[in-house]
């Protein structure tokens, strides 16, 4: 049976799974979730009561959470690009980098976006903390990426699948400044990667949904 990914083209965590699928040209059905549609939301809730996506369905198996989906694909539907190294120590570094991008780039980015959706109930202190955390993350990543092409090891991996959406949207909400040239260059490499570029292009029709206003770039 063909894989089915329940996701949305503009959702940042869905990008991680999509990039992994596109990286290996893995056949799958893209089931676009519309939480504003009762039937679509109910179908997602049937698969995962928290109604979070992406969700991957492989026959009778339902796989939850973007990182686990990428690892599942690497294990059960491998392609020419290994997204998690066989070597345990190298795999640990890839997993660490994945956690870094999710926890220290993705999370504060989403906090700023969420605040923009609150209307009058804004939290300036929370936004300030999120921006400070992003600055700290950019500075740490700058040191890591000075002599690297990809986030972990010599090849594109799960870590880069995680980095691509995190840095793409983070730069929209809190621009990566000139003090971080290695991070900026890494983001450009990510955006130019065919699997990432395809994901970016598929999300273009939905940019008007971005609450802070999508910039005229990327």
Image (cartoon, rainbow, N blue to C red):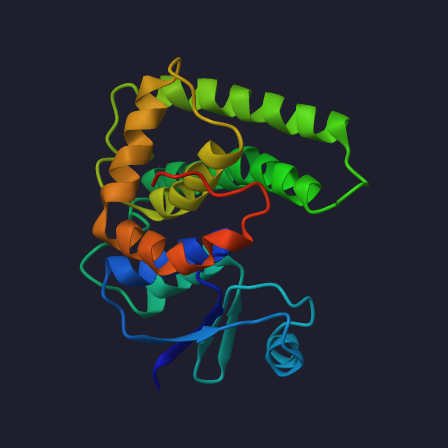
Where residue 54 appears, x then y in whole percent?
A: 51, 64
Asked if residue 170 lies left or right of residue 44, the reply is: left
Residue at point 53%, 59% (across, down): 65
**Which one is nearer the viewer's eye here, 120 or 60?**
120
Asked if residue 100 lies left or right of residue 79, the reply is: right
Residue at point 60%, 35% (across, down): 108
Q: Is residue 212 visible?
A: yes
Residue at point 33%, 50% (across, down): 84
Where residue 198 appears, x then y in whole percent?
A: 28, 56
Q: Is residue 74 visible?
A: no
**As drawn, which residue projects farthest toward the left?**
80
Number of numbered callouts drawn: 0
Above-or-below relation of 144 to 37: above
**As drawn, which residue projects farthest toward the right?**
121
| Location of residue 1 (image quadrant) | bottom left
Above-or-below relation of 202 to 131: below
Where residue 95 appears, x then y in whole percent?
A: 43, 43
Give the quarter of the figure containing the C terminus: top left
Where residue 136 appears, x then y in whole percent?
A: 54, 20
Above-or-below relation of 68 to 1: above
């Amino acid at each position: 049976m063909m894989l089915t990914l329940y996701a949305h083209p503009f959702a940042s965590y869905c990008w991680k799974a999509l990039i992994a699928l596109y990286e290996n040209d893995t056949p799958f059905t893209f089931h676009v979730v519309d939480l504003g549609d009762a039937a679509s939301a109910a179908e997602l809730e049937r698969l995962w009561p928290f109604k979070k996506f992406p969700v991957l369905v492989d026959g009778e198996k339902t796989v939850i959470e973007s990182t686990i989906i990428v690892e599942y694909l690497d294990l059960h539907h491998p392609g020419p690009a290994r997204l998690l190294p066989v070597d345990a120590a190298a795999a640990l570094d890839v997993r660490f980098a994945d956690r870094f991008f999710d926890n220290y780039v993705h999370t504060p980015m989403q906090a700023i976006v969420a605040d923009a959706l609150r209307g009058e109930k804004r939290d300036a202190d929370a936004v300030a903390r999120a921006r400070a955390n992003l600055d700290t993350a950019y500075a740490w990543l700058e040191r890591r990426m000075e002599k690297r092409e990809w986030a972990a090891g010599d090849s594109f991996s799960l870590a880069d699948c995680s980095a691509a959406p995190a840095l793409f949207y983070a730069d929209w909400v809190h621009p990566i400044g000139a003090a971080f040239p290695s991070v900026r260059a890494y983001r450009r490499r990510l955006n130019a990667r065919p699997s990432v570029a395809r994901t970016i292009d598929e999300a273009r029709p939905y940019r008007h949904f971005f609450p802070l206003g999508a910039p005229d770039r990327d």
